[in-house]
Amino acid sequence: MDTISVYGLMEIDNAIIIDIRNFYYYNLGHIKGAISIPSYNLLNNHNHYLNKVNRYYMYCDTGEQSLELVRRLNLFGYDTVSVIGGYDEYKRVFG
C-alpha cells in the first residue's frame, strides 16, 4: 500500500493532490494546490477524474478513508498514494 507523509508530499514538485472530503470541508481549508474530488465521485466515476499514467496523492481528515480509497483505486490499475494522517496531520505540522 502506497503512503506518504505530509513532509514527503510537500517535497514533490507538481504533485497532483486530491482532497477526497466533501466540498464543505474542502472550502473550510485544504492542502495548498489540492483539488476537491469527493470520495463518492472518485469511486463512481474514477475513469472520468483519473488516468493510469499519473500518480495521485489523496487525503481525507485522518488518512483512514483515503487509505481505503487508494487501496480500491490501485486494484483498478491507478497509481494512487494516501497521505498519512490526512488533513489533520497537515494542519498539525504546517499550521
Image (tube, helix red, strand yellow):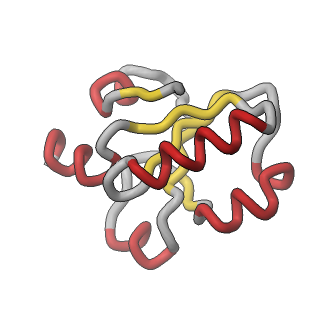
Q: Is residue 57 above or below residue 7?
A: below
Q: Quadrant of residue 76?
A: top right
Residue 41's spot in the image, x, y percent?
A: 70, 66
Residue 52 in the image: state x and y as whole percent: 81, 31
Q: Quadrant of residue 51?
A: top right
- Residue shown at 43% from the left, 67% from the top: 26
Residue 91 at x, y = what percent? Answer: 20, 50
Q: How many badges with numbers are in the image?
A: 0
Task: Report the residue at 52% width, 25% height from top.
Answer: 2
Q: In this picture, is 95 found above or below 54?
A: below
Of residues 67 and 60, the one nearer the viewer is: 67
> In the current view of this chain or complex, which residue is farthest to the right?
47
Residue in the image at 70% along x and 42% along y: 73
Residue 5 appears left or right of 78: left
Q: Is residue 54 left or right of residue 83?
A: right
Residue most extreme to the bottom: 24
Query: Residue 37's x, y, as percent?
Result: 61, 61
- Residue at the image point whose x is 35% and y is 22% from the top: 8
Residue nearest the viewer, comparing 76 with 23:
76
In the rendered structure, the answer to whether residue 47 lies left or right of residue 80 reads right
